[in-house]
Amino acid sequence: MGSSKNLPYGSWPSPISAHSLVEGVSVITDMSIDGEDIWWSESRPDEGGRVAIMLQSGKETPREITPPDANARSRVHEYGGGAWWVAGQYLYYVDFEDQRIRRISPDGQFDFLTPEPPEGQLWRFADGRVTPDGASIVCIREVHHQFDNEMEIEPDNQIVSIATDGSFQIKELIVGADFYAFPRPSPDGEFIAWIQWLHPSMPWYGTELWVGKIFDGQVTNARKLEGGSGESVMQPEWSFHSDLYFLSDRSGWSNLYRFSSEGSSLVCGGEFDIAGPLWGLGQSRYSITPENDIYFAARNSVNDTLFRNSTENEIAQWSTIHTVRSSASGLPTVVAATYQDQSAIFQMTPEKTILFTPKPHVVPVEYLPDPVDITFPTFDGGEAHALFYEPAHPEFEGLRGERPPLLVLAHGGPTGSARRELQLALRYWTSRGWAVVDVNYRGSTGYGRSFMEALDGEWGVKDVEDCVAAAQYLVQERKVDSKRLAIKGGSAGGFTVLAALAFHEVFSAGASRYGVADLETLARDTHKFESRYLDRLVGIYPDEQDVYVERSPINHSQKFNCPMIILQGVDDAVVPQNQSDHVVSALEKNGIPHAYLLFDGEGHGFRKSENIVTALEGEYSFFSQIFGFEPAGAIQKVEIIGKQ
């Protein structure tokens, strides 16, 4: 790039603005097929983050089926998922506002199928399917009880049957377990399969596959088929001939199995994961056609590959495949993305037809090179992984002898992984001259069960060390500036950020979005789904209270010695605002430069366009002030309290 201009790293002008991330942008969140009709859901930041349901029938122009004020989001498990489904051209969806199920007919008639809950209860629904006779829906119901003598009662999770005739009749079909997922009636209407699990497990640790007989509107002869405390079973599906398939990680990898009267047998296996962690309900990573072909997405350390029946029949590759479905004619359809393009809907015709893509970005590909997969040594002789993005701009280079600042990203979960797809919010940084490393620390998924389990009892230690080690590795490789190392993360990633800044002295600045500061508060105050998660990540509470105290950054607040920006949603039920308040109080007490951005009407994660913009520009403004360079573009300067 001999003609490139030289400007300090971090200050390059960029075509990627924070506003370009949200203006007119929609994100495909799920996709379903009814016959040959393609349905999908879109999250729209510039409409307050609401989720709309779209339909493309034949060669017609896609159209929204939900009313303009609809927001198809479930709150089951707080993370939702599975908020809508389609059968016989009827759309069924859960509206975020009241969590009641609505139905929209092909001619546009709108009906409620669930009533207002009784006094003292709040109901949430998700992950539904219509029975073959069309008379009812089977789905998950989560019953929240109002406070009783100021003591909150844990919600009840159930599988229920809901009449589709508008009578509001609801029958409890399956109760007793702490959690349920994937209630799936067989095509002949004779059986129902489902997944369940108990405290203290999470669905990626141990679940059970059950099946029962449907008789006279009830489930009888229920029995466990597979799974247990050390095996994660996911996504049971019936073939059109009523054979039962499922995913299991019993081999150490999530592979595909079939159940028969002789037991279960491996259909396709290897060192790859088909299922991902079940943070959101209703996931579909494989589908079965009427001809009994099976299309599945297999994830390795590099990409996702769509196969038919076995790994010998590769169909296509993307950096990420989110959803796999099949039409009535057997044509596989996926929601997939690359590092250059956001998620789109592809139909596996010989030409790999793009059925729909949201508003395309107009960023030249020169700003969007693939990241480099790196594997680096951990402090204890092991290894971890990351995606490394170098600064990318076709017109600018840094000053002679200068190395770029580094932004270390700690993903949430912690049972999650670095996103392998276009992230304009990440390219916002690289196009301005930042290097970014998205760390798959031990505990991340996509590398097999043993890598995920490496974080057992070590959350707040190994994840933190791996983020530190990634930064130090890139410094040693002479890729980044050792004096300008920043770290950023949200939720569990925010905890990693706070712990890194409390227990290590490698980073010069940090950004925590709704991060966990006090593990004891999290163990006591969080919602049902995650209420026992820390038993495995940290230790059983309160028996091992000393570990919780020792690992909590808030108890070591005197060690906070570098600038931080804290971002928090006021309505967050997963990590309540008081956690961020504690951190800010400690920073004030220590006289550490900091900024605190609170967002009304936001929960766990920011969905409104104006808040997405404010958060990203606030972080960039904060880091530019701390690292001493002039930010590119006209952005609002964030106020830093205690700035020297």
Image (cartoon, grey):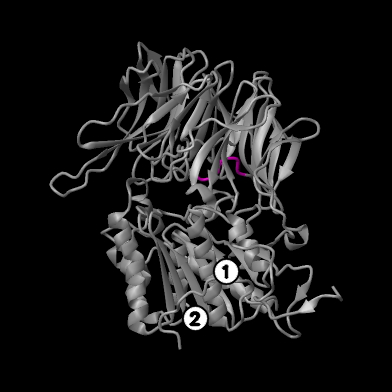
Residue 519 position, x and y percent, is 34, 63
Nearer to us of marks 1 and 2 is 1
Q: Label 1, secondary structure: give it.
A: strand
The amino acid at mark 2 is Glu
Quarter occupied by residue 237 = top right
Is the residue marked by circle 2 packed among few (<14), some (14-19), or many (20+) residues within 10 Å? Answer: few
Q: CA distance from mark 1 to mark 2?
A: 14 Å
User: Which residue is at 45% across, 37% downward?
Assistant: 70
Is residue 363 visible in the rendered image? The answer is: yes
Q: Identify the residue under disc 2.
A: 505
In the picture, the quarter occupied by the N terminus is bottom right
Near-viewer residue (203 or 581)? 581
Q: Amino acid at mark 1?
A: Val
Q: In the displayed structure, would residue 549 be above or below residue 245? A: below
Could you tell me if the residues under marks 1 and 2 are in contact, i.e. CB atoms within 8 Å?
no
The residue located at (62%, 20%) in the rendering is 35
Q: For residue 263: magenta?
A: no
The picture places residue 298, in percent across and down from the top left corner, at 65, 41
Mark number for residue 408?
A: 1
Task: Name the residue at 51% across, 55% down.
Answer: 609
279 horizontally vs 163: left or right: right
Does the magenta-highlighted stretch encompass residue 276?
A: yes
**Where are the magenta residues, as a range?**
273-277
